[in-house]
Image (tube, rainbow, N blue to C red):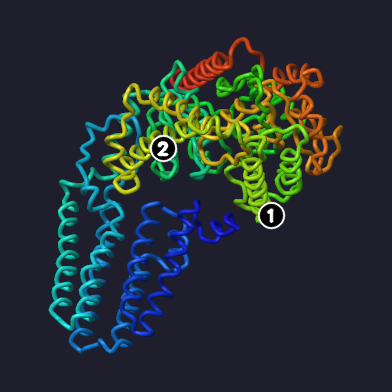
Amino acid sequence: MKALLQRVLGTTTAGESATATLLFLSYPGMLLGALIGNLPLFAGAAGVSLLTDHVLHRRRAPLIGRLGRARAGLTIRFLLRELLLLLLLVRADLAEPALLTVAVAGFVLFHAFQAPHTGLVMMLRRRRRLPVATRNIDLSTLPVPDGAPRGLTHRATEKMLHLELPLFAAVLTAAVTGTIEHALIGAAVTTLAALLYLLALLPYLRAGKLPPSPEHTLDWFDGWLRTHQPTVALYFSGSQDSAYQVNMWLETVERLDAKAVVILRERNILPQLSTTTLPVLCVPSAVDLMNLDLSMLRVGLYPANVGKNLHLLRVPTMKHVFIGHGDSDKLASINPYTKAYDEVWTAGRAGRDRYALADVGVRDEDIVEVGRPQLAPIRPAGKPVEGRIPTILYAPTWEGWTDDPGNTSLILAGENIVRRLIESPVPVRVLYKPHPFTGMRSPAARAADQRIRALIEKAAADRAADPRWAAESERTAAERARALQMLREIDKRRAADTESDELGSWDDASVSRDALTPPGRAAEETALRAEWNEAFWRSFGWWEHRVVTGPAPLLFDCFNESAALVSDISSVVSDFVASGKPYAVTDSAGLGAEEFRRQNTAVRAAVILDNTAEGLTELLAAVHDPAADTLAEERVELKEYLLGPDRPTSPERFQAAIDDLTARAEARNNGVIRIPAQATPPTTAPAP
């Protein structure tokens, strides 16, 4: 019920749900107070309405966006409160003509300021936006003056509307006291404050307060590219939720022995980009990107197959490589679009064989096996901690773009998997980490996810009440409390950093100018993430079932906490193979174990589950008793087949592939350039 309420209200926590409920109830309260002429009831409901609205805005609750899309945005909610106040004056026989005149005229005059204020804010935002947003590029020679102070621009619409409060409160006071002067003073204060707000913004439209023109800015970036001379570009386009696809490659590209640059195409990816020392160019316009001088680039790396890749693929002086964002047996790993690239880099031999079997036009000589450099954080199985129960991670993939039952186990098998794990005779702890896209397209997947969350929450509550775990809970209470406090402190530090970066959504130019990663920042954030991760796992009992969502902890952190995995055909399985631990994969399409193994390389060393999940008995036996782990040797062989050999290391192979392709691009360019010089100009034949 709680999950359903949060879903309906568009909230993420119980506190937000309670706040949203009070907001919704406040309007009937104001209406009732107005209809019966009860001024205290109306004033109390209006106060609750204003306070809850403000709190939800501060927390950026999704409900606020939903209300806006439903044409019940912030301005409408303020107007509704004002109309209900006027209704109160009429119904309570407080509507003296003079008071009504002041109230109506004051509200009309105040809202007359809204249009110029909104237009001014939008104009400033547009003129403060560079055609190329950046990170880690020194813009000191591109004159970018400071924009308007944060106090004027941050949540500007909300601040402007709240200037109405003196008038609103003064009208209520005048209604109680019968003194019209209160309303006149309130109207004057509100009108003057709105006017001053407008006047304070106007100076920032002066030419001296605006960044250079788009043409000048693009010319500057051409000069920067020619001076900096990057040879490798990590290119990415996608939705805000897909930022993980580029983030997983940042550290690998940073370590390259080559100058590299990150090229993004959507501004909303920038705030989601992990800390990096690489220079970042975000170029939303295809025309701007295609007009930039990119002739110095030699290798383009593409983590995703998207239409906007075309805008860089057209550059002939570089070689283009599809590197993907995971190794799996999904159809995405053999997409015919991949023919567009000069090369396709796979983790191991398995990727090469997939393309050969699929016969989608990718030639074998264009495939290079480079391993998976990102898998270094995955630890192999360690010695079990005495007295602790093992953890089983259920990490289903999302439902995909089609209704193929083989896309995800979530819909047909998810509840059976979780229920059997929870009810296992030999107890285990269940971690459930759904894919971040879960339910994005399929209502059935979304509903299954909610039911599984409810199952785990109930099982966690039942286990907390079980006497078997009570003593351990009491013994570790102080340690868990300290870990929770540490989490709060780290989250506060992170929130402060986020708060300081919020201006980026408004003043693009200033953020690009100032966004230079300090030399030790990446190392500090890595250490902070490790500290947060350790505190997170200590903040709840090692016996407690848990739903794990959000960007942290990372999936690899969940791998390291788990003794086994249950998942679907996805890169999750291939990555988990690096740990050497037992795992199970669900045959949701009902192909049968033999055919399922034949079609999907990554399940050759897996326990195969059907939609009833009965096969979990075999997986749990392997977890509890190494002697019962009959697939251990097969996992060792599969690891090399999927991910490549341990020597040379994956980073070394990746660097070698970069060097080779760079040399080939240079040879191609030199050859093209020499041809005209070597050609003999045609001579005019002598006249007969």
- 638 relative to 495, above or below: above
The disc, 1 or 2, on the residue closer to the chain's N-terminal end is 1
Is 268 or 313 nearer to us in this picture?
268
Name the residue: 33% across, 39% down: 496
Q: How crowded is mark 1: few (under 14 residues within 10 Å), some or many (20 or more)?
A: some
Tags 1 and 2 in contact by the CB under 8 Å rule? no
* 431 lies left or right of 488: right
Is 315 or 685 nearer to us in this picture?
315
Where is residue 200 drawn, in percent x and y?
A: 16, 56
In what element is the residue under mark 2? helix
Quarter where residue 572 is shown: top right
Name the residue: 18% across, 51% down: 204
* Mark nearer the viewer, 1 or 2: 2
According to the image, label 2 marks what residue?
Answer: 488
Where is residue 409 drawn, in percent x and y?
A: 73, 43
Q: What residue type is labelled 2?
A: Arg
Tell me if I can see residue 400 in this picture: no
Mark 1 and mark 2: Cα distance apart in space: 35 Å
According to the image, label 1 marks what residue?
Answer: 444
* 158 lies left or right of 98: right
